[in-house]
Amino acid sequence: MRLLATVVLLAVASPAVAADEDKAKEVATAFIKAVKAKDLDAVMKTADVPFLKDDKGKPKLIEKTEDLKADLKAMLEKILDADKLPGEVSEALDLPAIRKLLEGKNAAADFKTFEKVLGDKGYVVMLGKPGDERGAVFVRIKDGKAKVVGFPK
C-alpha cells in the first residue's frame, strides 16, 4: 500500500515540478532578453527582492525594490556588448541538485544564503548552450510565479 501511495505521489508531483522548472527557464530567458535590450522596466518585471548578487567576491543581498532598480540600472549601463551575453538557457538545477553540487566545498553558508532568496522552490538556471554555460540566474517560484532573484559572479 505504501508503494502505491509513493507512486501516486510521484506521479502527481512530477508534472508540478516540471511546470515550475519550465517557469524558471521562461523567466530566466525573459530576464536575459531584457538585459540584452538594456530595458530596465522589462528587467524589473522579471525580478524580485530579496535579490542576491556578487559584489567583489562577496554575496550582497538587496532587500528593497528601489535599491534593486538602481543596482540593475547601473549594471545595464556597464554592459558594453550585449550581443556577447548568452541568450538561451541550458538547464535548471533545483535545491537538492544545488546542495549536491556544493557538497564538500565548504559552502554551507552560501547554501543558506541561496535558500534565503530561493525559498522553498527555487532554481539556478544555467545560461548558455548546454556544455558551454556562461553564467546563471537564481529563480524563485512563489505563489505559482517565477522571478529572478539573483545571479552569481
Image (tube, rainbow, N blue to C red):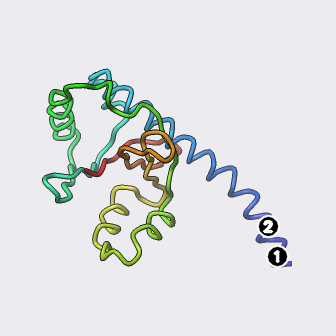
**What residue sits 16% from the left and 40% below the top?**
67
**What residue sits 42% from the left and 45% below the top?**
133
Q: In the structure shown, which secondary structural element does the residue marked by tag 1 occupy?
A: helix
**What residue sits 43% from the left and 39% below the top?**
128
Which amino acid type is shown beneath numbered disc 1? Leu
Which amino acid type is shown beneath numbered disc 2? Val
Q: Which mark is residue 85?
A: none
* Residue 96: percent from left, percent from top: 51, 67
The crowd level at tag 2 (other Cα within 10 Å; few <14, some 14-19, many 20+) is few
Q: How far is disc 1 from disc 2 in space, using C-alphas?
A: 6 Å
* Residue 98: percent from left, percent from top: 45, 63
**What residue sits 36% from the left and 30% below the top?**
45
Residues at marks 1 and 2 touching, judged by CB atoms closer than 8 Å = yes
Q: Nearer the viewer, residue 53 or 69?
A: 53
Q: Nearer the viewer, residue 84 or 124?
A: 84
Label 1 belongs to which residue? 3
Label 2 belongs to which residue? 7
Q: Is residue 149 above or below residue 3?
A: above
* Residue 52: percent from left, percent from top: 26, 52
